[in-house]
Amino acid sequence: LLPQQAGEPKWISIGLLPMHARLMHMYSQLPDQGHECNMDNLYNSVFFSRESFALPQKVKNQGVIRKSQRGMPPCVFQEELTGKKVELARGTTKVAMLRGDPKSDNLLVGSCYDQKPFYMISHVAPSVNWVVCQKKMYSDVLKKNVLYKFLRWSLSDNYNFEMNDNDVADQYRLV
């Protein structure tokens, strides 16, 4: 298919968006199973992730997902806050797992409050927890580079690690 084509009608007929239909066509051409695909919020949806995993190739999607119109369960929603409430909410997480679905193998969806809530979806992550990360930073007090340790939500850590240099700004934002 050419990039401007809408995708195979069979994918459109089950309710997938044209951009998802194009991806499903590409996924269905993979010669083996178990590929993982990291995507930004434009592409991700619960329905699309379930259909991708239902293919014989069992493609596992993960990445940032929009809160609305993408199939996120309300139990993971977090209210956007202002002022001092933001600091109190920082690090709050909510996670749901879809189990027992023949089109899904423990699909995780969750939210984590940073400067505002952000939402992730993953067929890839085996669990959700906090990961100790570290990076070198310059200390004005010590006048040298020091190793700075911090916690990062495992869903965003795995996603950012897998994205390599594609999303460096977000990796530093999550410190």
Image: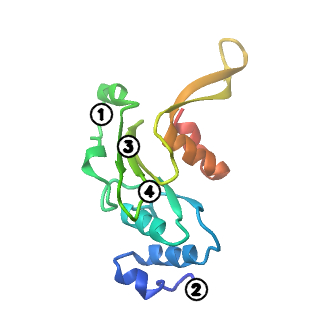
| Secondary structure category for the residue under label 4 | loop
Q: Position of residue 15 (x, y in %)?
A: 34, 77
Mark in the foreground, 4 or 2: 4
Label 1, secondary structure: give it: loop
The residue most toward the right is 144
Tell me the number on the disc at residue 105. 4
Amino acid type indicated by mark 1: Thr
Comparing 43 with 125, the one in front is 125
Residues at marks 3 and 4, CA–CA distance in whole angstroms: 19 Å
| Residue 133 appears left or right of 71 | right
Q: Secondary structure at mark 2?
A: loop
Residue 109, position as x, y percentages in the image: 39, 49
Q: Amino acid at mark 4?
A: Asp
Label pair 4/1, CB-CB below 8 angstroms? no
CA gap between label 2 and label 3 equals 35 Å
Q: Which residue is mark 1?
A: 82
Label 3 residue SS:
strand
- Foreground of the two, 54 or 149: 54
| Residue that label 3 marks | 111
Q: CA distance from mark 4 to mark 1?
A: 37 Å
Label 4 vs 2, first from the N-terminus: 2
Disc on the earlier residue, 3 or 4: 4
Residues packed near mark 1 inside 10 Å, few (<14), some (14 to 19) or many (20 plus): few
